Amino acid sequence: MITARIVTLAVAAVVIVASVVTLDAARSDDGAQFVSMWGSLGAEPGQFVGPFDVAVDGEGFVYVTDPGNHRVQKFTREGTFVLQWGSQGTGPGEFMKPTGIAIGPNDTLYVSDYFTDTVQQFTREGGFLRSWGKSGKQPGEFDSPAGLAVGRDGAVYVMDEYNFRVQKFTPGGQYLTAWGEKGKVNVVISALNFLLPDDREGQFYYPSRLVVGPDNLVYVADSYNNRVQVFTTEGRFVRKWGGLGFWGGRFRVTSDIAFDQAGHILVADFYNNRIQTFAADGTYLDEFGEQGEEPGQFDGPTGLAISAVGDVYVVDFHNNRIQRFRLREEGS
């Protein structure tokens, strides 16, 4: 639901941003320092129509899924355009709506295609390697695959959004296991026009993203239950946190998750237009961002990635740009 909703809205958005803007580590908020940003609305190299997810490889190159343009774009750490691949279609290397992206073994890339219900694997230069999946509810089939994650053993985890489950595959795409089901929702509408979900463990309501943490646990952005759920790599429930709200530790649609080098958990909070930071046990620590178009502000953060040198990349969906931050050091 989050994926379909925001990809559709992007086509109507008209937000123009300078190609590359850099400030000298200007402070965005207590939680991070703004470093630079790039992107604007359009179809030229370095432009986007509803950018959705971001990944960083071992050499620091940045990859962004660009669903409205049916492509993946590759940039340097600073945002200089390197190359792109993909076009509208259903064949190998083509996309209808590429959404999730994750770095796999040997810096290959996995990309989920939301409307063709497939996962494709590529080289870092965009060379097609393989694909798997088709529409359906059976093991290995998808209904709108969104986020992707790769475990330390190379296993690929796919957030199967409209089937309300996580599916796990070998690096080559062979099905291993799955878990999750649709969460039961109370027939109540809040003042914010959000459905209020039951608090059932292991159930999802339009989940969008996931990540495998340094503890080898799978963290799921259970988007419209406004929470994070944590599982073993075989799907056993471990813990959860969150809930609907504006204050620290609460969310209005969790849209992505990433880990920094210290083991802290960063969560993109879509409608609160911020990134929240948590300890490994889910304790709220800090946040940065607010709604707007200026550097360090967001209009729908949908994707997160953290490089080996600590750069934090945020996909700023409605502003059609990527922002780069440096996390505040503890005690500073």
Image (tube, rainbow, N blue to C red):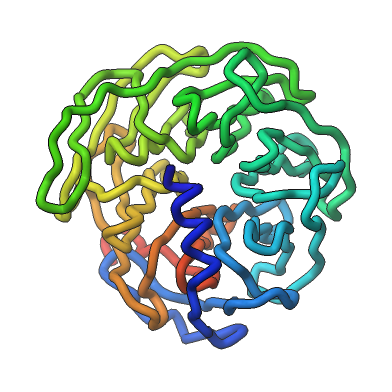
Outermost left residue: 191
> In the figure, 133 relative to 64: above or below?
above
Q: Residue at x 17, y 28 (%)?
A: 186
> In the figure, 79 relative to 135: above or below?
below
Q: Is residue 261 visible?
A: no
Q: Name the spot of residue 251 as percent of width and height, x first.
A: 25, 48
Q: Quadrant of the C terminus?
A: bottom left
Q: Residue at x 47, y 15 (%)?
A: 179
Q: Residue at x 50, y 79 (%)?
A: 14
> In the figure, 232 relative to 324: above or below?
above
Asked if residue 94 lies left or right of residue 230, the reply is right
Asked if residue 37 lies left or right of residue 198, the reply is right
Q: Locate residue 154: give its quadrant.
A: top right
Q: Locate residue 76: give its quadrant.
A: bottom right
Q: Name the spot of residue 269 as percent of width and height, x first.
A: 33, 53
Which one is in front, 264 or 174?
174
